[in-house]
Amino acid sequence: MALVGNPQERGQTLIVIGVDQGGAAVCIELDDVSKFNEFSLQCSAGTMNCQVSLDGVIYTANDMAWEDEMSTTPQTRVIAFAAGNLYVMRASIKSIRIQSSAGGVVNPRLMCGTVGRR
């Protein structure tokens, strides 16, 4: 599995600047995020979706649901991420893969952090 994106580690936080994609393709992929348990995602244009893996080999067949932090309804979960919104997922996983939807994505960003004790 290849690293996709430009990771910038800042203490207990990892920020990944993803690759702009013009069609359905991987824009962010990390093979080991096991030291993190909270993930935030956003982009400036386009839409994205996410698959995760518990062992780094087998990825989820369906997209993961994330909380839409911009929604006026608390704890609204979505599987396709719209531009300009902020999405959060709390999970214990090994690997994560963010893909652009068919229309592409611009400026995808993923922040990995730790909440509580790890």
Image: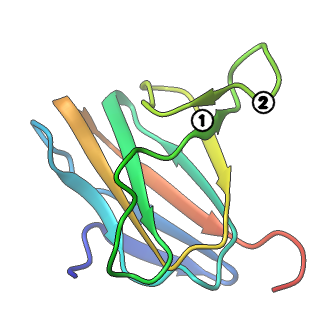
- x, y percentage for residue 38? 69, 62
Q: Which mark is residue 86?
A: 1
- x, y percentage for residue 83? 42, 26
Give, as a three-letter code, the residue at label 1: Leu
Q: Mark 2 points at which residue?
A: 75
Residue 51 in view: yes
**Placement of 78 over or under 64, stated as above or below:** above
Residue at 21%, 55% (x, y): give it.
26
**Placement of 64 over or under 51, stated as above or below:** above
Q: In terms of image quadrants, where is residue 52?
A: bottom left
- Closer mark to the observer between disc 1 and disc 2: 2
Residue 104 in view: no
Q: Residue 76 carries which label?
A: none
Q: Is mark 1 on a helix, strand or loop?
A: loop
- Mark 1 vs 2: CB contact within 8 A: no
Which residue of the protein is positioned furthest toward the left in this rendering? Answer: 22
Give, as a three-letter code, the residue at label 2: Gln
Answer with left or right where residue 118 lies relative to residue 40. Answer: right
Residue at 68%, 23% (x, y): give it.
70
Residue at 40%, 74% (x, y): give it.
7
**Placement of 59 over or under 62, stated as above or below:** below
